[in-house]
Image (tube, rainbow, N blue to C red):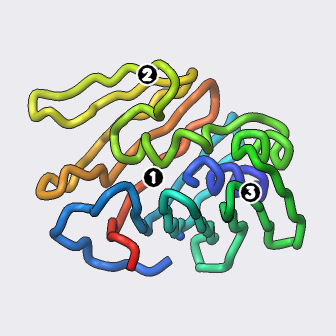
């Protein structure tokens, strides 16, 4: 269960509930808070996430449903560090490698910040299906399927997503999107 929660942390590369601002995000930087539910086979986990992303840094925290920290992943100067609640620490210059080493199976860490905003990660082929409103409905890239289930229509940002590959499924409900200060 703890490994699955850590997997959700990495894949969703979390934990107050804030009302979403009405302005669009500036550039590629964002902060988000929300909830997640992850399932792989018969195992499942849920909790909260808080993620601060910029072009050069990431800080992602996953907490259990009552707010206790489960794991934290950071990116500084191109180095990713995963710190678990039981004081295990994993370090790598490759986000996907970090996930594979820490969890024993791959997760889409490198593409997630783009996928959350409805676009393929640069440098690799991807396919996006759009609805009549122009919003992405399905994005497929590198064997992953991202389904956009709901949007903040004023700002064209997803509020509910499902990320899946094989028997791994992660559902994300984003409660707030903001621009970092």
Residue that appears at 43% across and 21% down? 126
Q: Give the mark nearest the N terminus, 1 or 3.
A: 3
Q: Where is residue 76 in the image (x, y as percent from the top left)?
A: 67, 64
Please name the residue that numbered disc 1 is placed on: 172
146 lies left or right of 7: left
Which quadrant holds residue 135?
Answer: top left
Q: Give the mark nearest the N terminus, 2 or 3.
A: 3
Please name the residue that numbered disc 2 is placed on: 126
Q: Give the mark nearest the N terminus, 1 or 2.
A: 2
Please name the residue that numbered disc 3 is placed on: 79
**How far apart are the alpha carbons under marks 2 and 3?**
26 Å
Are there few (<14), some (14-19), or many (20+) residues within 10 Å of tag 1? many
Q: Is mark 3 on a helix, strand or loop?
A: strand
Q: Position of residue 31 (x, y in %)?
A: 42, 68
Q: What element carries label 1?
A: strand
Which quadrant holds residue 174?
Answer: bottom left
Location of the C terminus by quadrant is bottom left
Disc number lying in front (1 or 3): 3
Q: Which mark is residue 55?
A: none
Residue that appears at 74% across and 44% down? 94
**How far apart are the alpha carbons under marks 1 and 3?**
25 Å
Residue that appears at 40% across and 61% down? 29
């Amino acid at each position: 269960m703890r490994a699955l929660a850590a997997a959700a942390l990495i894949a969703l590369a979390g934990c107050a509930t804030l009302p979403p601002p009405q302005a669009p995000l500036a550039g590629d930087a964002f902060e988000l808070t929300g909830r997640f539910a992850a399932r792989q086979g018969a195992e499942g986990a849920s909790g909260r996430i808080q993620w601060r992303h910029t072009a050069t840094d990431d800080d992602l925290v996953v907490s259990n449903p009552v707010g206790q920290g489960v794991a934290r992943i950071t990116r500084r100067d191109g180095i990713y560090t995963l710190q678990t609640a039981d004081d295990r620490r994993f370090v790598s210059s490759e986000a996907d490698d970090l996930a594979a080493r820490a969890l024993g199976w791959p997760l889409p860490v490198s593409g997630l910040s783009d996928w959350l905003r409805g676009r393929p990660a640069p440098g690799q082929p991807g396919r996006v299906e759009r609805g009549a409103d122009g919003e992405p409905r399905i994005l497929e890239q590198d064997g992953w399927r991202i389904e956009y289930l709901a949007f903040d229509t004023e700002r064209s940002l997803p509020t509910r997503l499902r990320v899946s590959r094989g028997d791994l499924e992660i559902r994300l409900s984003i409660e707030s999107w903001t621009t970092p200060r």
